[in-house]
Every structure is written in structure tokens, then in C-alpha cells.
Amino acid sequence: AANAPAVAAASLARGVAFDPLETQDAQGSTFEIEMALLSLDDMKLFFADGLKCGDFDDFEFISPVACSGNHVLAVGPLMIDLTTGDSVPSLNDLTIPLVGFDQVNMKTIPGDPEMGVVMEGGPLDGVTLYLEGTLTCAGGFTVCTGTHAFSTSLTFNSNVPFMGAPFTVDEATKSIRLNLETDDWFSALDITQCLEDADLNFEMDDSLIIANGGNPCDNIENAMKNAFAASAKFGEVVGGTAFAPESLPEGDHEEGDDE
């Protein structure tokens, strides 16, 4: 295009991670997340300033990265380890234009071993988000005491938008970071109280599998899914400036097809 911006390659390396690695439920019990695996269908990065793919005639998009309309697409499936930012396949060598973006969408799907990314019988086989770690019970309870291993397997299809102030990929490090804020993942859940009331129960090995329990604990999984989707934000541009979604766009981007 005549007014095409000057661009260089940026990496999606370590594209998604979360901070911190601890969260608390409504009763104050602490869940330290030691493993967090996420299954994605794809990631889309939407250009800021009205840019479209036709503005990047001189930029080579190399598969599995493509450009469509008003966004860059990282074609999945992808498995991301949220505790390290590593992924399968690796995002280290995927390149995108070094320009401004103002929204990133992650499309989550249950892992499918036939797609060649997740292992059959592994934690993401048929699962979208798998968490495991250590539960440290808050004081003052009789059933939930001490520490326990915990895990949860959530299955859902969702479009998770990271929105906020427009950002430019940092030119020095040529990488970006997206954050999932775990603070609110469990904060509305009455997991400790559900254990006290026997609506949730520890397993024979004294571990806890977090899943829907008896009333009023029958909506724990949906509450966790909703909290996960709401926790997405732009993180720091590595080596650059941090942006949080304090001023959200009025609506999600439409995925335009105009080149």
C-alpha cells in the first residue's frame, strides 16, 4: 500500500503467562498453582490505527502465522503452559509485524490428541484448562485443615479477548506478553465452605478435585470458566510499558476480510 508503515519482525515468544501464581477462595484458603495448561484453537492480534493486511505487502507471513483482514492469525491448535509461557508448537519463531495492536483474542477449545498437540490420556485430553497445585486451608475450619494437593479440569469453548490501550510490540526485545490475572479466579468460590458442608469432598488420598458439587456448590466449574475469561489483560510489553484494560473499547473487533 502507498502509506504502508515500515515494519520489522516481532516474536510471539512467551506470549501468554500469568502473575501471580496464587489465588484465594471466598473463605481465604490459598491455592498455589503449580501447573496450568491451556488448549487453544488459535490466537488473533488485531491491528490498531485502522491497519489492514494490505498495508504489509512487503512483510512475509510464514505459516502457521497468517494475515486476514484486520488481524494477524496464529493458527493452532496450541497447547500453552501458563506457568512458563512455553507452548506446543513453540511460538519462539513465529513472527508478526512490529506495529501497534489494540486487541488479542484467544480461542479456547478442548484438547484433541488426534490434532497432534496434546497427549492421549494426558491432562488436556478433552480438557481446555487444567490446573493443579497446593491448597492451604484458612484457619478456623474443621474439615479443610492443613495442606492438600488439588486439581481441576475445565472443558469449554470460548473467545477470550485481551483488550486495553493500544500497544506496540517492544522493538528492543521484539516480543509481547499477555497476562491472565489469577487473583479473581477463585475469589467468588466457596470451596472451603463447600468442603465444610460436605458438598465437596477430599479424595481417598486426601487430595481435592475441584468440580461441581452439591447445592449450593453446583456451579463451581462455570464460575471458574467465567473468572478465567474475565482475567485477560494486556501485560507488559517486555522491556517496555505495561498496559492494563482500564479503558476498554466499546466492543470487540469485527474480523474484517478486506485486504
Image (cartoon, rainbow, N blue to C red):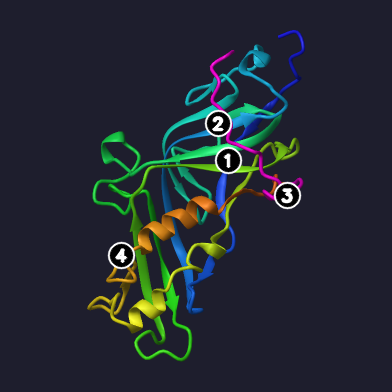
Location of residue 96 (image quadrant): top right
Q: Assign a secondary structure to mark 4.
A: loop
The kind of residue on which mark 4 rests is Asn
- Identified at 53% across, 49% down, the residue is 85
Quadrant occupied by the N terminus: top right
- Identified at 35% across, 63% down, the residue is 219
Which numbered mark, 1 or 3, is in the foreground of this view?
3
Q: Nearer the viewer, residue 7 or 195?
A: 195
**How many neighbours does mark 3 have within 10 angstroms: few (below 14), some (14-19), or many (20 or more)?**
few
Which of the numbered marks, if any, corresponds to residue 94?
A: 2
Q: Main secondary structure of the magenta part?
A: loop
The kind of residue on which mark 3 rests is Ala
Which numbered mark, 4 or 3, is in the foreground of this view?
4
Q: Nearer the viewer, residue 105 or 35?
A: 105
Q: Nearer the viewer, residue 183 or 246?
A: 246
Residue placed under numbered mark 3 in the picture:
242
The reply to whether callout 4 and callout 3 are in contact (CB within 8 Å) is no
- Identified at 44% across, 37% down, the residue is 89
User: Mark 1 or mark 2: which comes first in sequence?
Assistant: 1
The range drawn in magenta is 239-259
Q: Assign a secondary structure to mark 2.
A: loop
Q: Assign a secondary structure to mark 1.
A: loop
Position above or below: 208 against 157: below
User: Mark 4 or mark 1: which comes first in sequence?
Assistant: 1
Location of residue 4 (image quadrant): top right
Residue placed under numbered mark 4 in the picture:
212
- Identified at 44% across, 57% down, the residue is 36
